Amino acid sequence: MTQAEIKLCSLLLQEHFGEIVEKIGVHLIRTGSQPLRVIAHDTGTSLDQVKKALCVLIQHNLVSYQVHKRGVVEYEAQCSRVLRMLRYPRYIYTTKTLYSDTGELIVEELLLNGKLTMSAVVKKVADRLTETMEDGKTMDYAEVSNTFVRLADTHFVQRCPSVPTTENSDPGPPPPAPTLVINEKDMYLVPKLSLIGKGKRRRSSDEDAAGEPKAKRPKHTTDNKEPIPDDGIYWQANLDRFHQHFRDQAIVSAVANRMDQTSSEIVRTMLRMSEITTSSSAPFTQPLSSNEIFRSLPVGYNISKQVLDQYLTLLADDPLEFVGKSGDSGGGMYVISILTTCHLLSSFLSRFGSRCARIFRLVLQKKHLEQKQVEDFAMIPAKEAKDMLYKMLSENFMSLQEIPKTPDHAPSRTFYLYTVNILSAARMLLHRCYKSIANLIERRQFETKENKRLLEKSQRVEAIIASMQATGAEEAQLQEIEEMITAPERQQLETLKRNVNKLDASEIQVDETIFLLESYIECTMKRQ
Amino acid sequence: MAGNKGRGRAAYTFNIEAVGFSKGEKLPDVVLKPPPLFPDTDYKPVPLKTGEGEEYMLALKQELRETMKRMPYFIETPEERQDIERYSKRYMKVYKEEWIPDWRRLPREMMPRNKCKKAGPKPKKAKDAGKGTSLTNTADVLKKIEELEKRDDGEKSDEENEDKEGSKEKSKEGDDDDDDDAAEQEEYDEEEQEEENDYINSYFEDGDDFGADSDDNMDEATY
């Protein structure tokens, strides 16, 4: 794991779980697999705290354990999974667009808690939804369960590996750690639960309705008097499926950009049909006949079969090979990743200037170019071209290929060709992205810390105003309280808010870039 | 590879013109220090995308950040005692739910060792009567003293009292209706508080987990 990744992981863990968990997590990422005692010893934290931290990390699928010989259990951290935490808002938003608020809350609860049983999820979501509804209405469990089942059917949530149930007790002592197994078939099998009930509204302590039981405080736990029917069956969000969805979205939008809306719809249909049949990392989708496509086109797109065929031919002939004729269809993964990477790299290079981008695209297209040729083709004055080439070279976006004319490799008699190696350029860019996100997070934390006093003050004032409004205060009094925050302070708060928003938004967008780059690198490595 | 360093005159082994400097031109200075920390960029970065989706994700992100801090998974670092006990601190405590992991899914060594198994039902009752008062603490501790013989009881009860008063993040609000899952929860709480002292707690415990535990290599005194 590179330093930049480790730094980013440390920042993320600290923000979400606190410093103790961060220390343990980063230590595990750095040093690989380790047993409990060594962790405690190396990080200098007490055994008890290490245990707590590890429990939290395991719950959130960030750390896994393995039993080695002699009964030693070793813990290993998954760095890439930690980096996924950046993408949580995107996952949740995607679910919202697909399955509306109920789905969104389900996924949110699963992401926040790591893993949950279905009944727990349904209960929490129903409670939350009930609170947002108007008085008197409550959310039925059945509706939430339905959405949950739909999510499971489309593989957005999956079951966690569970403890194998053994009928007979082991003759020897139980193993030091359970080995969790999961059956492929069972991964999306929803247990037959009949969850009857409605969401409960959480009342504030002032209005304590007589009938409502008092256990509605934040500290209230589930009624564990009744046995939980699906005990032991935990669910987690299936991040790979989300990634597949993002990929499909990128493909469809790329097609739409290149051609028109209709062809993008066709591609989308093809992708949707092969959603579940293709595994998420396959380079090509299953072959689909045009008849099938025709049948599955969404209603409202009443184009005739002929037109569809025309479109397909158009797609197939496109030099970027979105679709391949007969045989396999949909060069999905591979080509689109290249396409998006190109877009990315050129937009990044717009930082260096549009001319640089031109040169870059040129070299990419022609594969190898000599310096003179670069100047000629790009129509850029020699001096500038050289300058840019060397700048890109120093940043490792380009590389030089030597072709000696003479066996002694004399520099004056050797061709030096510029070439672009996308894979290494992508990796470099990815590394930069990690660094930039780490910087963004740090800056945001810095800004917040600087103005901590002011923020606290404004929070207090807001609380006072709210409570006064609840008890019905006059306008004049409210004015007075509001003036506790002076105008320049207000200004400062505004600026702070704007900055923090900007930083957050940048984080989200850099994360999109990271996603594209990572999936490109992943699928390129697979093909080799 | 010494080559001909040129008698007094630099001669390049390659065609200098190819690199871009005409013959005889002054070469740029050698850079002797690291590049500036915030170099000027000639071109402004591309503006951020804005749209309904992006705004929603932004709000979501900030909300998630806040929510995470309130979850039981966020383990706070125990602060050292401040010199002045601030009045406002008492009202700014965040109420957190306790979270018990599913022990069946975790390695056995993760479980806090149950020293209080014998004292199980009693501390539960004692705590229900109203937490935070030292009276119950001493009552609770006295019960334990009766059962566990080989300990330094005196210091222990003091430590426990101190810990219970000092720990502001533990579930200290007076909830009298906290009866159901109190047993495991209390044990877990007790464990955390007990472990905060330096005393070696794992003397002979009547054969409880002794020898089978993975902790038995610890440098504690065994006789």
Image (spheres, coloured by chain):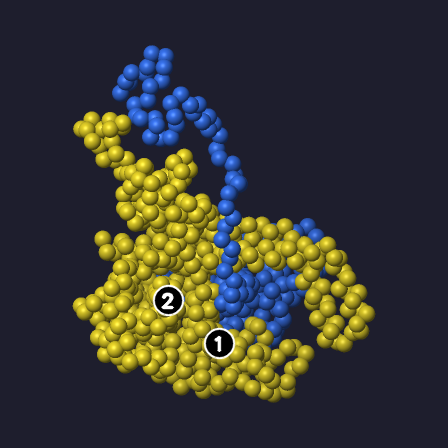
Chain colours: A yellow, B blue
| Dot label at residue A320 | none
The residue positioned 42% from the left and 64% from the top of the image is A59
Q: Residue at x 71, y 55 (%)?
A: A489
**Foreground disc of the pair 1, 2:** 2
- Label 2: which secondary element: helix
Residue B46 percent across, percent down from the top left: 49, 53
* In the rendered image, the vertical position of residue A201 relative to residue B53, given as above or below: below
The location of residue A258, given as percent across then percent down, is 35, 63
**Residue B147 versus residue B193: which sits nearer the camera?**
B193
Which residue is label 1 attached to? A101
Tally the marks.
Answer: 2
Query: In the depicted view, which residue is nearer to us: A155 or B179?
Result: A155
- The quarter of the image holding the N terminus of chain B is top left
Question: Quick check: A279 left or right of A217?
Answer: left
Residue projecting furthest to the top:
B7
Which residue has dot 2 on it? A256
Position above or below: A56 against A262? above
Q: Amino acid at mark 2?
A: Ala
- Asked if both marks, 1 and 2, belong to the same chain, the answer given is yes
Amino acid on which the number 1 mark rests in the picture: Asp
Q: Residue at 65%, 82% (x, y): give it.
A: A208
